[in-house]
Image (tube, helix red, strand yellow):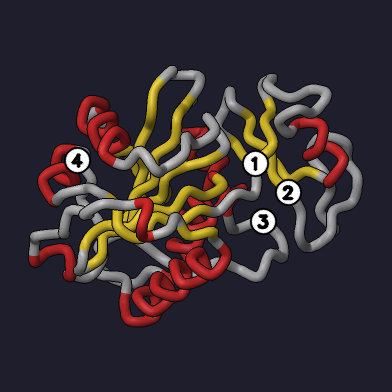
Amino acid sequence: MAEVCEMCAEPLGDRHGHAVDTGTRALLCVCAACRLLLSRGGTVARGRYQAVPERYLYLPRMRLSAADWEELQIPVRTAFLFHNSALGRFAAFYPSPGGATESLLDLSTWERVLAANPELPPAEPDVEAYLIDRRPDGFACHLVPIDACYELVGLVRVHWKGFHGGQEAQEAIAAFFDGLRRRAETIPADAQGDAAPADDPAAAAPVDAVPVDPPSGAGCGGGPVAAAREEGRGRD
């Protein structure tokens, strides 16, 4: 059965946009016309439904220390943080085999991290996220549409095997971030000062709960929309 826009029932192509239901945190598949109406400056923008933008930025060397990471209470290599307008604060999640797992975010630590990285532009509430990747040489940050984060979450259920995910998942993680870097506009190195090193051998250890390679764009049944709906049910 062909997918249709969840706002107007117009048939959708393989590649289409998404909107966030800010009340339930669910992602909706939407046609180009509805996405335009729900975008910033659109006729019905800034209501309950917000169009997910298509901005990709990459900060190769984020000023973030291993101690900061521990204070943020994130036990794995990758997490995404976004401003939840319903709660009036940032929320942090990390991908796991069970879905998007929420971290009890230390808001003061996160505010300090943002202040230390002034070149990072603000993420749009609800629809953009800071996706942080801990690497052996330090931390990198991707500012991405929120559906990219849920794409990562949805795919872990398909690819993850065992405790550490397996070789296939580890290779797919690298491919996923390679894809983000190719798509993103990189914040120039001369816009940054010295970034904090990972300074922890654990930074090079296998990821305990992060997957994999984004799909080609066909269908959303097992990807970002399904993952966001799972998270929305968890918030109810």
- Residue 200: mark in rendering: none
Residue annotated with mark 3: 220
Could you tell me the amino acid type at mark 2? Gly
Q: Is residue 199 left or right of residue 149?
A: left
Local crowd size for mark 3, using a 10 Å CA cut-off: few (<14), some (14–19), many (≥20): many
- Classify mark 2: helix, strand or loop: strand
Instruction: Give the number of the mark in front: 1 or 3.
Output: 1
Dots 4, 2 in contact, CB < 8 A: no
Instruction: Give the number of the mark in front: 4 or 3.
Output: 4
Q: Nearer the viewer, residue 210 or 188?
A: 188
Dots 2, 3 in contact, CB < 8 A: no
Q: Is residue 25 above or below residue 120?
A: above
Q: Nearer the viewer, residue 15 or 24?
A: 15
Residue annotated with mark 1: 52
Distance from the alpha carbon under mark 1 to that under mark 2: 7 Å
Looking at the image, the residue that sits furthest to the front is 190
Residue annotated with mark 4: 73
Q: Quadrant of the N terminus?
A: bottom right
- Classify mark 1: helix, strand or loop: loop
Q: Nearer the viewer, residue 67 or 58?
A: 58
- Classify mark 4: helix, strand or loop: loop
